[in-house]
Image (cartoon, rainbow, N blue to C red):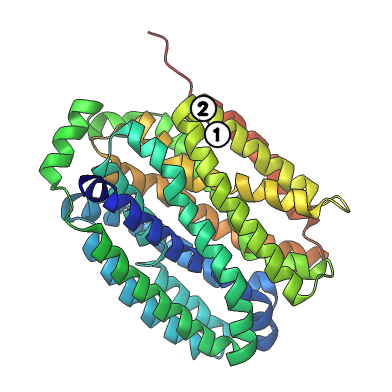
Amino acid sequence: MKKLQFYRPAIACFLAMMNFALISSGLSFFVSTVSADLGVGRGSFTLYYSLMAISGAFAAPTLGKLAGKRGVRGLFLIGGVWVLVGSFLFSIATQLWMFYVVGFLTGLMGNACTMLCVNVALQKSYDSKTMSALMGIVMAGSGVGGMILSAIIPGIIETVGWRMSYRIVGLIWLTMSVLVVLVMGKEKTSAQTAKAAVQEQGMTQGQMMKMPQMYLLVLESAVLAASCGILQQYPALLGEMGYATAAVATMMSLMTASMAVGKIGLGALYSAAGVRFGGVAAIGMFIAGLLLLNVPGMVYPGMILSAVGLGVYTTLMPLVTRKVLGSASFAAAWGIVQFGGSAGSFVGVPVWGASYDNFGSYAPALFGFSALLGVILVVHLLVTREKKS
């Protein structure tokens, strides 16, 4: 019974990450259908997803402070209702600008709230070693959720249409948000968390804000998140390669399963070998996967490798943030780092779509983001470098 109580926050966060898959991968199945119905390009359409990300970026620092002081359960509930309303508004949108407005408003309590609350809840509930061990398992929830959604969302869209499908997504989001709150149980108080954080790291917020490593973390977060914009284009990318809808659904299930297993493996790697080597390995796999997607006959290896590499943003960045900036002000610190990630998504998602709209191919984006990830691999080595005593 005591073990169950100990792992309740982790279980709740796993469920929250399953829910996060509705945004991170579930919405990708709407791109081809909705953009064609509206008569707009994919890059123009997916800008609404970018607006969700940028509004979430501006909200993240404030939400981080609220989560640290007031707890995450209330934010999960507010976010659940907020996204439900946004989904219903998406379902009645008839013009592109409506998606932009609703996307911006939905992002304020949707995307940022979920990822932010998960990491704050884990940091408040566990010490560094335990958090490292659990991070991969918890973040694998998005892969499990994505695998389930990949099997059902394409069929739902074909059966009831994209408008009703948006409403179903909203109802799923709210139901899962309520379940997360019920499973999580009572949270630690701010005083308990602050005392434990000071004992573990002893870093003040003022010291954290003066550290140049924080800005490198924001940069790393931004580029990794921008590269993850391929998630919104994977179904369309596979469709352009000639795969039928049923085959695309199967391949997406394989990819999300690879993400889930890969995140668990990355979490174990971080716990055993540290975040420095784990980050290098994950970024390297991401680069290799993107490059292999351009090679005929290597689509499956490319998907699997890039899927594992996609886990670096969600599994690695919270651990590096805690390691470099300290636990004492993790909630506020993570809000700032996530600002970089959300800003990266704002730029990255439409760039992936614009690659196809302007060049008739995703190859320019695949090569371009591979090069950027190579730069970020060096940045990661710099930010995780141990200081000489």
Q: Going by the picture, which residue comes out furthest to the right?
A: 296
Q: Residue at x 18, y 33 (%)?
A: 196
Instruction: Look at the numbered discs 1 and 2 and tell me whether their residues touch, using CB distance below 8 Å.
Output: yes
On the image, which quarter does residue 326 sit in?
top left
Image coordinates for residue 156, horizontal then vertical, percent: 58, 84
On the image, which quarter does residue 149 sit in?
bottom right
In the figure, 86 relative to 183: above or below?
below
Q: Going by the picture, which residue comes out furthest to the left?
A: 191
Q: Residue at x 29, y 71 (%)?
A: 178
Whether residue 253 is visible, yes or no, is yes
Quarter of the image where the C terminus is located: top left
Q: Residue at x 60, y 58 (%)?
A: 256
In the figure, 365 relative to 263: above or below?
below
Front residue of 73/140: it is 140
Image coordinates for residue 277, horizontal then vertical, percent: 55, 27
Image coordinates for residue 238, horizontal then vertical, percent: 76, 65
Q: Give the amino acid type for the residue marked by disc 1 in the picture.
A: Gly
Q: What residue is shown with label 2?
A: 276
- SS for dot 2: helix
How many numbered marks are there? 2
Q: What residue is shown with label 1?
A: 279
Whether residue 219 is visible, yes or no, is no
Front residue of 222/110: it is 110
Disc number placed over residue 382 in the picture, else none: none
Image coordinates for residue 105, horizontal then vertical, percent: 39, 74
- SS for dot 1: helix
On the image, which quarter does residue 243 sit in?
bottom right
Q: Callout 2: 10 Å neighbours few (<14), some, many (20+)?
A: some
Q: Give the amino acid type for the residue marked by disc 2 in the picture.
A: Arg
- Residue 70 as seen in the image, left or right of residue 163: left
- Residue 222 as seen in the image, left or right of residue 210: right
